[in-house]
Amino acid sequence: MALNAKPLIAQSILRERVAALAEEIARDYEGRVPLLLGVLKGALHLTSDLARAMPGPVEIGFIRARSYEGAESTGSVTVSGIDAIEIHGRHVLVVEDILDTGRTLNALAQQLQAQDPASLRVCTLLDKPSRRIAPFEAHYTGFTIPDQFVVGYGLDYNERYRELPEIYVYEP
Ligand code: IMP
Ligand code: MG
């Protein structure tokens, strides 16, 4: 791990919170099979951990969204992979690593709504509400954090540190 990083959320805390989210989501979707739609690459661990912690059945899909260069939001969002997934009539639960300016999820929600899902909700592991530019609220949030750049558990700095099992504050 790089020098300028300090632990923010330990592995055991992450595990507990993900288990609680999974139970809440399973309760809300009882009698339906949600499509967990993970947003790559940041949500790779969360999507997998949520799916395995869910007491009920789920389906899993992945799409790709990109807005960041280094530690800066570029403002333009590229979404790919939606066309390969049947969204129409599905109970779609987007699984995202972090809600920051809100641009990514606004763009994504708009594109998904256009495919006419039966329902559309968003689960984000982290939320930095103080950074919001485009108003957006997730239905399920793991942790609300201050305006700090974080890495680990899927989150990267220039593609590094995604593999770390816990979350760190990173100062480039
Ligand atoms: P938004 O469009 O500004 O809400 O940005 C959301 C995306 O930016 C997330 O999916 C992340 O990929 C990335 N991002 C935002 N904040 C951080 C951070 O603190 N660390 C790593 N990636 C971040
Ligand atoms: Mg991301």
Image (spheres, rainbow, N blue to C red):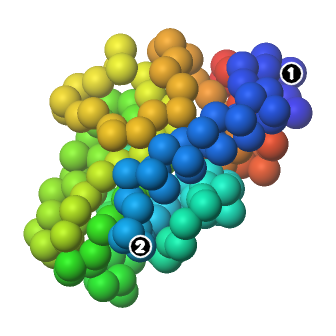
Circle 2: element type? loop
In the image, taking residue 124 as reference, residue 5 lies left or right, namely right
Of discs 2 and 1, which sits in the foreground? Answer: 2
In the image, taking residue 61 as reference, residue 46 lies left or right, namely right
Q: Amino acid at mark 1?
A: Leu
Q: Amino acid at mark 2?
A: Val
- In the rendered image of this protein, does residue 157 appear above or below residue 29? above
The image position of residue 69, as x and y in percent, is 48, 43
The mark that comes first in sequence, 2 or 1, is: 1
**Which residue is under mark 2?**
33
Circle 1: element type? loop
- In the rendered image of this protein, does residue 40 appear above or below residue 125? below
The image position of residue 163, as x and y in percent, is 78, 50
**Can you say which quadrant of the picture contains the C terminus?**
top right
**Which residue is under mark 1?**
3
The image position of residue 5, as x and y in percent, is 78, 21
Image quarter of residue 164: top right
Residue 105 seen in the figure: yes
Name the residue located 45 percent from the left edge and 34 percent from the top edge.
Answer: 141
